[in-house]
Image (spheres, rainbow, N blue to C red):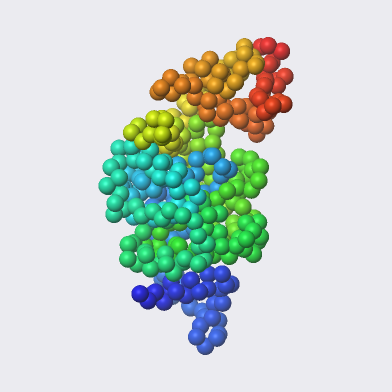
Amino acid sequence: MALPDPLMRLVNEARELGGGKDKSGDLATVTAPDFVKGLVAPRSVVRGILRSGYLHSLSAPPNHGKTSIGLTIGAHVAIGRDLAGVKVAQEKVLYLAGENPDDVRARLVATCRHFSIDPEQLRDRFEIHAGAFPLRDRLPDIINMSAKKGPFGLAVTDTSAAFYSGEDENSNVEARAHGQDLRVLTQINGQPAVVTMSHTIKNAGRDDLVPRGGSAFLAEIDTNLCCWLEGETVTLHWQRKIRGPAFQPMCFQLRSVVLEGIVDQWGDPLPSVVAVPITEKEAEAHKRKQWENENLLVYVMAESPKGSVRDWARSCSWLDERGEPQGWRVSRLLKSLADKALTNPPLVRKTRGDRWALTEAGKTEAGRK
């Protein structure tokens, strides 16, 4: 099947600097009146956040909710359901699951179950490719697929690194080329909003959530979305670059769930995570609960300094549906209490043997210096 000329040109020239020449070799120009005639109001897939035909990076450190949020947004776009009061257009979704497709599969099941979405509702609305590949090599295949199965309104690459065509993510030249490759996806059938899940630079704090690749990659994208996990609440916002008006942060709660009926060889149900959109008022309530949980954990650690993560979870009465201690909850809180960006001075620290202990500040906080 022959590719449409504009798209074939994008594939062939995705990594070249724009020549801006007409067929005669001269610089192509148009008059100002002709130029402004082409102005149209942009379409949005998620009102005020994801614009059609725009390239967005969703940048965050590992385990800060990128995949869960991507699947929640994707499922809501596919069925046209609003997100905590934010308007969502119903569009077909393309999801390229390049990093750990099995985890994406479990999280999609968890997402469908939580939001009462029958997977059959997504049959003609949500297309998924499982597996990584160099994006540059497969752009013609993606364009052909979109011509047959599109139009698409949202395209997600999870993660950017899984579809990187270069050798070094920190190379400015390669990072710029990768951004240009991703830009082609905005021009497939439907001109979708494109979201690429990006790992942040090493040791990034909450105020430095930019994608790897430095200024070269940042220059190629339209908007740098970012998410930051604090306790169980993830805040989705933007940093450094946005094309279009700014928007208010959107909050999600990461909820750990078990997938009943899907068990391992020991009969244990498969655990997973789902991102649930919450209102600003609900986010504030979660922050207060986070503060209370941190205080409780500090007190329990002071009472039982030689305890384990599971011991402390049990002492805090943080148990799952089977009565097992939720060690993950304690581990997440410990990371927050040890983070200078969140708690200064830190209230906990790692000791010899990779064990957690209260700092002097933590002992003072617990009233047990």
What residue is at 62 percent from the left and 61 percent from the top? 167
> Is residue 226 at all visible to an observer of this figure?
yes
Residue under the image location 45 percent in, 43 percent down:
103
Quarter of the picture containing the N terminus is: bottom left
- Image position of 247 with respect to 345: above or below: below
Quick check: 308 above or below 190? Answer: above
> Can see residue 86?
no
Q: Residue at x 38, y 68 (%)?
A: 144
**Quadrant of the drawing holding the C terminus:** top right
Looking at the image, residue 353 sits to the left or right of residue 287; the answer is: right
Q: Is residue 69 left or right of residue 346?
A: left
Where is residue 96 drawn, in percent x and y? 44, 54
Task: Please identify the residue farthest to the bottom as the structure is shown.
Answer: 24
Task: Relative to 87, say whether 169 is above or below.
Answer: below
* Horizontal and vertical percent position of residue 18: 56, 73
x, y (%) of residue 60? 56, 44
Find residue 228 and report its image quarter.
Answer: top right
In the rendered image, residue 138, in percent from the top left (x then y), is placed at 47, 66
Say which quarter of the image contains residue 129.
bottom left
Along the viewing direction, whichever of 243 and 15 lies nearer the viewer: 15
- Count of numbered marks: 0
Task: Please tell me whether residue 108 is drawn above or below residue 303 in the rendered image.
Answer: below
